[in-house]
Amino acid sequence: MIAAFHSVPWGPMAEHRRILLDGVATQVVRDGEELVAGDGHRVPAEQAIHLPPVEPSKIIAVHLNYHSRVDEFMTKLPPAPTYFQKPTTALNSHGGTVVRPAGCRYLNYEGEIAIVIGETCRNVSISEAEARIAGYTIANDFGLHDFRDTDAGSMLRVKGSDTLCPIGPGVVTDWAFRGKTITTHVNGEIRQEGSTDEMEWDMGYLVADLARTITLLPGDVILSGTPAGSRPAEPGDVVTVMVEGLGALTNTIVEGPTPIDASFGAQPSNSEEVVATALGGDWEHRGVRAPMSPGSGHYRAELDA
């Protein structure tokens, strides 16, 4: 995994992807509308079967970072960022299906920019941290809020269930993250819209902060936060996250074939906490104020009817 990542010739601005080519995971570089393998083999990008562009040893995500998201929840940022971890089994790819387990209702999209670590990183300054970043890709930090009542602390099943971390389509090197737009579209309509200028803590800060106590390895992924407008997606929805200069990550929501086993363990919930969080904060559940984000009118709380 890490050895394969080291073999990628990161350099001047380029987009590196991983695809299935004749049944084999293959590193390719984007050249216009085509993907080019090391042996010169060319594949139309639209026809390629994509894999996650890297194989991280860990996926770490920051909680709140975008000011529009903070305002939406009518809260305040903590004095320093807080984080949770998504297991690598949650990894998914561009074009992949995202599974909402049968019996669950609150699977929220969260368009994000993912940092990809390029060199082993531990105890570095913020300026040094930026030099340890190989590049950036797009992520959708899906959350299964039906399990928020039991997993709100760890976020393990909320954010770590299978298929809930699509990243891709490729890692773009030498990309300047400041002043870039990020939008999330559901069935072609904008649901989230923001800018990296909204971020309280930038990419170098997040890497350096984590590396004070955690060794970051080549290929590791850090999700940098989402703007306002995260709402539940439904089976059949096509969700696309677009980031200026990074492209577009598209996934389709499907319902899982097997319901959560009701004979043991925590069960999906539709408590006030679950509904309020999934629908953008207490404001919509409690009627404190009107929705503020693009697309929020498409997901009005049933209790407001």
Image (spheres, grey):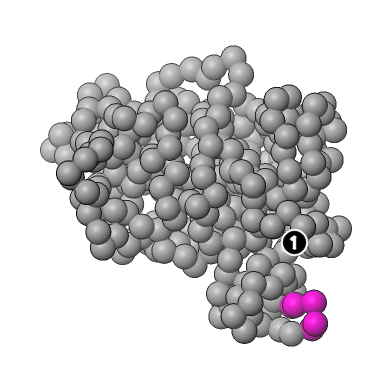
- Seen at 43% across and 19% down, the residue is 75
Quarter of the picture containing the C terminus is top left
Q: Which quadrant of the structure image shows residue 98?
A: bottom left
Q: Which residues lie in the magenta part?
A: 36-40
Residue 29, image x and y in percent? 74, 70
Mark 1 element type? helix
Q: Is residue 165 something one can see in this rendering?
A: yes
Q: What secondary structure is the magenta-colored segment mainly? A: loop
Q: Which quadrant of the structure image shows residue 283?
A: top left
Q: Is residue 140 something one can see in this rendering?
A: no
> Vertical placement of 267 versus 101: above or below?
above
Q: How many marks?
A: 1
Q: Which residue bears the numbered disc 1?
A: 4
Please rate how many residues cluster around mark 1, counting C-alpha atoms within 10 Å: few if below 14, some from 14 to 19, many from 20. few
Quarter of the picture containing the N terminus is bottom right
Q: Does the magenta stretch include residue 174?
A: no
Q: Is residue 39 magenta?
A: yes
| Viewer-nearest residue: 264 or 159 | 264
- Seen at 47% across and 26% down, the residue is 70
- Using residue 90 as the reference point, say whether residue 102 is left or right of it: left
Q: Which amino acid does label 1 sit on?
A: Ala
> Vertical placement of 149 versus 193: above or below?
above
- Using residue 224 as the reference point, say whether residue 2 is left or right of it: right
Residue 35, image x and y in percent? 69, 76
- Using residue 36 as the reference point, say whether residue 154 is left or right of it: left
- Seen at 73% across and 43% down, the residue is 217
Residue 250, image x and y in percent? 49, 62
| Viewer-nearest residue: 296 or 42 | 42
- Using residue 277 as the reference point, say whether residue 183 is left or right of it: right
- Seen at 41% across and 63% down, the residue is 97
Residue 246, image x and y in percent? 66, 56
